[in-house]
Image (cartoon, rainbow, N blue to C red):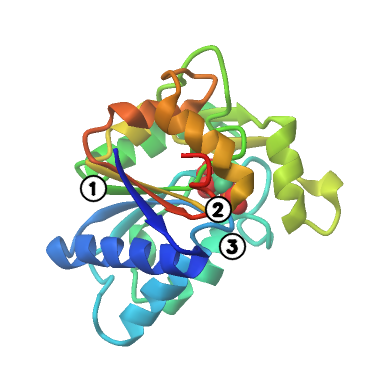
């Protein structure tokens, strides 16, 4: 694991965006795995800036999002589809058909999960996966468990995750309790992985992820085994290292 400590959130976002931009410049048809949540917002802003300045181009880029809430339609402002448009897709020249996000309102979860895995395979696999991390160590929505869930699946969110995500909803009661998420194997098959974490509320989890045992009880600890994993932290998230 390569660990980079940035001074603050702003510097973290700039570093993350420049590494992603490097990937896009080296391979213009890269398959990118993308995350939502607060952490990557600054990175997306930087990418949009670089696109506007003509430094990077998304014409041939293909994306797969890690997850989507189960039961929220794409038009719902809290859906991850909406989030991605708001923070990235509507500002860049990505093609609609190259954007993939699990369908949160599917009637047939099993086929939707299978379809998602097959779509990823068809592109040749994810070249570069961007990750955030939950306070409980989740990546995607792979919550602490007794085993690592392998592929895209329906997840019941932990109370801690529901509480953490309530800040985005007008009424905390509206936070969905389920989501469709890529599995740990899907994530680990990515050629490169970059995890971002900001703020002291993540510090204990980051310490465990880097120095603790590899265990499904802290799902992000599996990244210790990935040969091309980079972790970018701000000083607050790195304070216990
Ligand atoms: C989002 C995702 C989650 C978040 C994590 C951290 O697509 O998969 O794992 O990355 O919950 O969220 P923030 O960045 O809001 O702390």
Q: Is residue 206 above or below residue 90?
A: above
Which of discs 3 and 2 lies nearer the camera? The answer is 2
**Numbered disc 3: secondary structure:** helix
Q: Position of residue 190 (x, y in %)?
A: 27, 39
Q: Position of residue 36 (x, y in %)?
A: 53, 54
Q: Is residue 55 left or right of residue 95?
A: left
Q: Residues within 10 Å of mark 2 (few under 14, many from 20)?
A: some
Q: Which quadrant of the view contains residue 146?
A: top right
The answer, for residue 103, to whether it is visible in the render is: no
**Numbered disc 2: secondary structure:** loop
Q: Position of residue 74 (x, y in %)?
A: 60, 57
Q: Is residue 174 left or right of residue 88?
A: right
Q: Which quadrant of the view contains residue 225?
A: top left
Q: Distance between the Cα atoms at labels 2 and 1? A: 29 Å
Which residue is tagged 3? 82
Which residue is tagged 1? 127
> Residue at position x 32%, y 32% from top?
188
On-image quarter of the N terminus: top left
The answer, for residue 32, to whether it is visible in the render is: yes
Q: Which quadrant of the view contains residue 187?
A: top left
Tell which circle, 2 or 1, labels the residue nearer the N-terminal end: 1
Q: Residues within 10 Å of mark 3 (few under 14, many from 20)?
A: some
Which of discs 1 and 3 lies nearer the camera? The answer is 1
Q: Distance between the Cα atoms at labels 1 and 3? A: 24 Å
Q: Is residue 238 left or right of residue 29?
A: right
Depth order, front residue of 177/167: 167
Tell which circle, 3 or 2, labels the residue nearer the N-terminal end: 3
> Residue at position x 25%, y 71% from top?
59
Give yes or no for contact between labels 2 and 1 (Cβ–Cβ under 8 Å).
Answer: no
Which of discs 2 and 1 lies nearer the camera? The answer is 2
Label ID, residue 236: 2
């Amino acid at each position: 694991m390569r660990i980079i400590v940035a001074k603050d959130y702003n510097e973290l976002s700039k570093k993350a965006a420049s590494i992603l931009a490097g990937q896009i410049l080296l391979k213009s048809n890269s398959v990118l795995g993308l995350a939502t949540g607060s952490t990557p917002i600054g990175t997306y802003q930087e990418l949009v800036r670089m696109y506007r300045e003509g430094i990077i181009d998304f014409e041939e880029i293909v994306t797969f999002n890690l997850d989507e809430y189960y039961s929220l339609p794409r038009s719902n402002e809290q859906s991850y589809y909406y989030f991605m448009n708001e923070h990235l897709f509507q500002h860049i020249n990505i093609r609609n058909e190259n954007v993939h996000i699990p369908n949160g309102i599917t009637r047939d979860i099993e086929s939707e999960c299978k379809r998602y895995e097959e779509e990823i395979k068809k592109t040749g696999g994810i070249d570069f996966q961007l990750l955030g991390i939950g306070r409980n160590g989740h990546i995607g929505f792979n919550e602490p468990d007794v085993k690592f869930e392998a592929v895209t699946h329906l997840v019941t969110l932990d109370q801690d995750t529901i509480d953490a995500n309530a800040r985005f909803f007008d009424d905390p009661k509206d936070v969905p309790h389920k989501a469709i998420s890529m599995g740990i194997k899907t994530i680990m098959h990515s050629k490169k992985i970059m995890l971002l974490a900001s703020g002291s509320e993540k510090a204990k989890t980051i310490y465990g992820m880097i120095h603790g045992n590899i265990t499904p009880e802290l799902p992000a600890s599996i990244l210790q085994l990935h040969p091309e994993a980079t972790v970018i932290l701000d000083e607050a998230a790195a304070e216990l290292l």
